[in-house]
Image: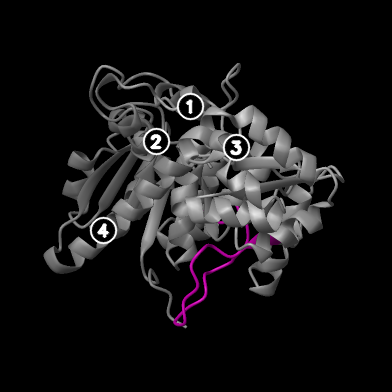
Amino acid sequence: MTLPLQGITVVSLEHAIAAPFCTRQLADLGARVIKVERPEVGDFARAYDQRVKGLSSHFVWTNRSKESLTLDLKNPDAMAALRKLLAGADVLVQNLAPGAAARMGLDYATLSQLNPRLVVCDISGYGEDGPYRDKKAYDLLIQSEAGFLSVTGTPEQPSKAGNSIADIAAGMYAYTNILAALLRRASTGEGAHIDVSMLESLAEWMSFPMYYAFDGATPPPRNAASHATIYPYGPFQAGDGGTVMLGLQNEREWKVFCDVVLRDTPLATEPRFASNAQRNANRAALAARIDETFSTLSTDQVLARLDEAQIANARMNDMAGLWAHPQLKARGRWQTVGSPAGELPALLPPGRSNRWQARMDAVPAVGEHTEALLREVGLDAAAIAALRAAGAI
């Protein structure tokens, strides 16, 4: 089985989420990903928590199928070894502090002299220029700067996303830009420089609320898990305490909802609820009417009525519910990967092909592949021992 990126070597100076998430996608497709870490401690995301058999949940998620190389890049011999790796690599990904890679001579202008075919992808909070270039950027801060918090939460309180949405956005745009650069290189022979910012990535994902507020118009209000402008569209409680999400899209569905789900056909033409605008304006009254019916039904009964009416719906799962989701099980999405703590369950990446299955190799220990990689670039036992004695690996 030939994976799409088999034969591609990626070197990554990465930490936290955005760059590791990008490079894990590349590894999933068969690229060899060499993760450069600090000696002994490694990527600081390794210490975020100990939720997965003593390993960090963030790290396990974003670092399978990689090789770990520990190098202290302040050591000239360690830097020389890295440059040997880069001379034969296809891609460099880095999300170090703003300007750090350039100060070490790891910018595209310098590296393209060493390896003209190299694709260099720099991931940062705000990009390589502009007035915010040197600002520190964490996921929550970018959620704030990109306006995400202003439209997420309750009317009284803004809320962050429950996952690292800005990091994920930046990681995915880095991934797709790298794929595009590799495709272009196949016909031109040229490497490329890619500058991905977390702010620009999340701003793209914010385009609907931006256009909704076009030219000074009122932005969409925060409505917790309900839709800002369509009703009923959001969470409703069943009589057994479960939560059901449902969404109506048009007047035909509203009539069927009243008839089949609420079993109250006259409600469909009641003036207060006769159009989406009226339902939106009279949310409290309609919510009370829906609750009146749902409170007499179990979660499964509510879902059954919604399915019968062909109204879009979902059960609000917690994490245990997602681990046990029958659709993921039925489609064989769970695999196992190795790790320093033993075998762990892991989801196959989205997208199922008839030509390949994603690579699902182990999560590496800190520096697990250091000696083998240094031997690959020509260092002998004495040179490796000297680096170890100096604390450079």
Q: Amino acid at mark 1?
A: Val
Image quarter of residue 285: top right
Q: Residue at x 38, y 72 (%)?
A: 4
Q: CA distance from mark 3 to mark 2?
A: 22 Å
Q: Earlier in the sequence, mark 3 or mark 1?
A: 3
Residue 229 visible in image: no
Q: Which residues are magenta?
A: 345-370
Q: Residue at x 80, y 58 (%)?
A: 300
Task: Determine crowd level at label 2: few under 14, some 14-19, many 20+ residues with C-alpha closer than 10 A.
Answer: many
Q: Residue at x 58, y 25 (%)?
A: 159
Disc 4 vs disc 1: Cβ atoms closer than 8 Å? no
The disc at residue 151 is 1
Residue 65 visible in image: yes
Task: Determine crowd level at label 3: few under 14, some 14-19, many 20+ residues with C-alpha closer than 10 A.
Answer: many
The disc at residue 45 is 3
Q: Earlier in the sequence, mark 3 or mark 2?
A: 3
